[in-house]
Amino acid sequence: MKPTSCPICGGPLRPTPYAAYDRLDTGDGPFTIVECPACCFGVTDPQLTNDELARYYAAGYYEGYYEHSGAGAAGPLHRLRARYRERSAARRNRRPPFELSDVKAGKVLDVGCGAGALLADFAQRGWTTFGIDPSAAAIAAAERRGARVHQGTLEDDPWPEESFELITMAHALEHIVDPVPTVERAVSRLAPGGLLAIEVPNWACWQRRLYRSRWAPLDLPRHQQHFSPRALERIASRFGLGVRDVGTSSTAISTAYSIHFLIAGRWTPGWKLWLSYAISLPLLPFVYLVDHFAGGDCCYAVLEKPR
């Protein structure tokens, strides 16, 4: 389906020069992106149905890319990468929007919980953890970490309204075909005064302009929506939510994978991927310095439901 208006504000969409194929699995495409200039918000064209999107989340996506089962290759480089991923995830979980050291622990729901690393961190801080994800492999991994989980989406979640003091969406909202009803349902699941913490790729960042259609966080067509700090603030305004915090953050993996797509054109495990890691490492201090002034490759918001 061709998008005709911005799902956030209803305004007109304009074309952008971005066109890319599915670089992870099928090679389908090209998919393009249209943009709402008022919201600084991008929409993948065409917009796919949930059934159409399902084919882009094959086992290769969950296991080859994310390795939810933990059964990846056992060589020394793979072990080193696994340790780096664990440490990087631990750092991300203790920075905005998920740091929340001034918030009393309660019940937290992570939408798109993946393997449950974020929930495990919240459990260490005294929270009672719940997760939801469409992937059976991800749900099994999150269960092993002690979370109460549901395989599915917010459209079929089993929890009543006002069940949670905190709902997190860590790189989940960009995958959803119609994000506005999803946010609305999440808000209904929040207790009065509860918080909604969202982190997504930053459509407004300089790296997107640098790498253009090979910027890894485009991830077409799985990323159906492309957010910016302005777009997150407009979502807050639409639902009458208070904005406790909004900003950007940086990830090392975005640079590495964007370089990989420049070199290989698509996801290619092997020497080209390791070469991409090696090239990106000395660039990271420069990337983080520019991010400090121009904005990182991720953006986030912590939104509060009125009491």
Image: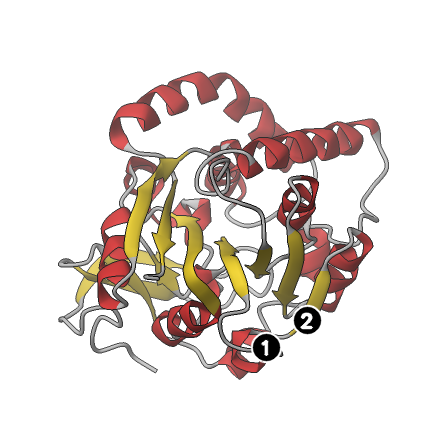
Q: Which mark is residue 128?
A: none
Query: Marks 2 and 1: CB-CB under 8 Å?
Result: yes
Residue for point 28% across, 47% down: 229
- Label 2 Cα crowd, 10 Å radius (few <14 / some 14-19 / many 20+): many
Q: Is residue 61 visible?
A: no
Residue 140: percent from left, percent from top:
79, 62
Residue at image x 23%, y 67%?
238
| Foreground pick, 172 / 192 | 192
Q: Secondary structure under badge 1?
A: loop
Mark 1 neighbour density, 10 Å: few (under 14) some (14–19) many (20 or more): few
**Please, is residue 259 above or below residue 234 in the view?**
above
At x 38%, y 18%, the residue is 286
Front residue of this view, candidates 18 and 304:
304
As drawn, is 141 to the left or to the right of 14? right
Q: Could you tell me which quadrant the C terminus lies in?
A: bottom left
Circle 1 sits on which residue?
A: 157
Please give left or right for residue 263 compared with residue 120 in the image: left
